[in-house]
Amino acid sequence: MSNTLLLFFLFQAAAVLAQTGNDSTTRVFVMELRAGIDPRTNRYTELALEEAMEQNADLIIVDMNTYGGAVNDADEIRTRFLEFEKPIYTFINKNAASAGALISIATDSIYMATGASIGAATVVTQDGAAAPDKYQSYMRSIMRSTAEATGRDPQIAEAMVDETIEIEGITEEGDVITFSTSEAIEHGFAEAQVGSIEELLQYAGIEDYEIISYELSASEKIISFFINPIVSGILIMIILGGIYFELQTPGIGFPIMASLVALILYLVPYYLNGLAANWEIIAFFIGLVLIALELFVIPGFGIAGISGIMLSLGSLVLIMINNDGFDFNFVPFEEVVVAISTALGGLMAGVIMMFLGGARLMNSNVFKRVSLEDVQDRLQGYTSNFQTSSFLGKTATTFTVLRPSGKIMIDGEIYDAYTRGDYIDKNSKVIVIEESGTSLKVRKAEE
């Protein structure tokens, strides 16, 4: 019995030692910030931290090389980092400018590569000029509060934004602070100069570690793919082309289904990345409603149709741009040009497809399978005219509104009728000018 108990305790001790050995391994989660700070970067960091929690990471390292970007997205990222319960280190390789500096200061420790820099956090507009003071004031305040939260000098952090701040031995009035690696270490904004993640961990005294490199999931990569301007242009073309072909050949279903799928693939990725605001999506559908009203309800083509086209196309452009309402101060001019070019390119391609693709669609095998091709020729005895006498020249009364088609009454009988495109009110006098099949072509009688 004693031998059995001894073996049991030995096995338990071995299991505890093995578990202790596993716990001693530091799980290091590495994410990369290697592009401009925008809604895509914002979503990337959110997903990365969620993955880090699922992976039970002990330490997060942000591998950074960015010249900055949108202040609102940077603010959300720095808040997310400050509130994260596990330590976060930044490895600046090679730049942490503007919004990148703010995000770096929000992390627990900063390490910099040789020749790296941090600072120059002045807020600028899309043309590179300094933004109005209200934006500078906001950036100064969050730089200062972030530095205070992570134990760094708040005045230096503020001087990275405000050129009027003078700090003896560090900066003179008229210059914003941009630290090199050695300067950042000297003034407490970086721990050390390292050449790699491995050197960083060695300097931090972490020897037994496992590195987990974060990669976007397949679904997120697909979302990123559909945000590509070229793909967006193709989707716009399919949306417009599908609607057109469905109107030309109602009942087929395939064109409108293709249009709906393209619309979903266009809107969802931009919405998930924070680019498509609710009001922009609503504006797009209002535009479609206006176009539909112009086509099916309101005669002719006027204000409603033009407004619908402008609203729909304008919303597609705004969806691609990281604007705050109609504030484009922080939207790079290049992004505006790309968005407008993409929407117009998709529109032009859609128009070309309508003209060139229409004939091919009608002659395609797919269309022949779903369309009626038999012709009931007059020479074979078929006729669609069931009138026993001619109504040419007769005066009739409109039984319904003609816009341009509707009903008319002749000698107490109701007949289908249409105009040459004119709008004629109910109970108006009209004259039959042509007989075509079961419908009568009319014009308004002169009063």
Image: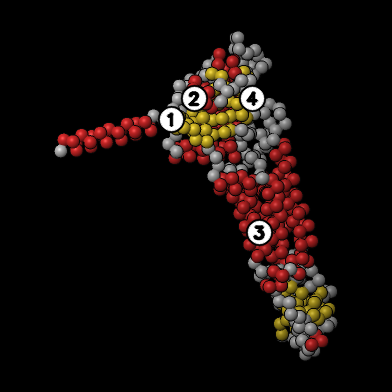
SS for callout 4: loop
Give the residue number, with chain letter if any, for mark 1.
26
SS for callout 3: helix
Structural distance between the alpha carbons of marks 1 and 4: 37 Å
CB atoms at circles 2 and 1 under 8 Å apart? yes
Assign the N terminus to one quadrant of the image: top left
Give the residue number, with chain letter if any, for mark 3.
259
Location of residue 30 with respect to 345 vertically, above or below: above
Structural distance between the alpha carbons of marks 2 and 1: 10 Å
For discs 2 and 3, the disc positioned in front in the rendered view:
2
Residue 226 point in image, percent of width and height: 63, 48
For discs 1 and 4, the disc positioned in front in the rendered view:
1
Specify the label residue 201 is tagged with: 2
Specify the label residue 122 is tagged with: 4
CB atoms at circles 4 and 3 under 8 Å apart? no
Question: What amino acid type is highlighted by mark number 3?
Answer: Ser
Residue 277 point in image, percent of width and height: 60, 45
Q: Nearer the viewer, residue 186 or 121?
A: 186
For discs 3 and 1, the disc positioned in front in the rendered view:
1
Question: What amino acid type is highlighted by mark number 4?
Answer: Thr
Q: Residue at x 79, y 61 (%)?
A: 356
Q: Quadrant of residue 248?
A: bottom right
Structural distance between the alpha carbons of marks 4 and 2: 32 Å
Residue 426 point in image, percent of width and height: 72, 73
Mark nearer the N terminus (2 vs 1): 1
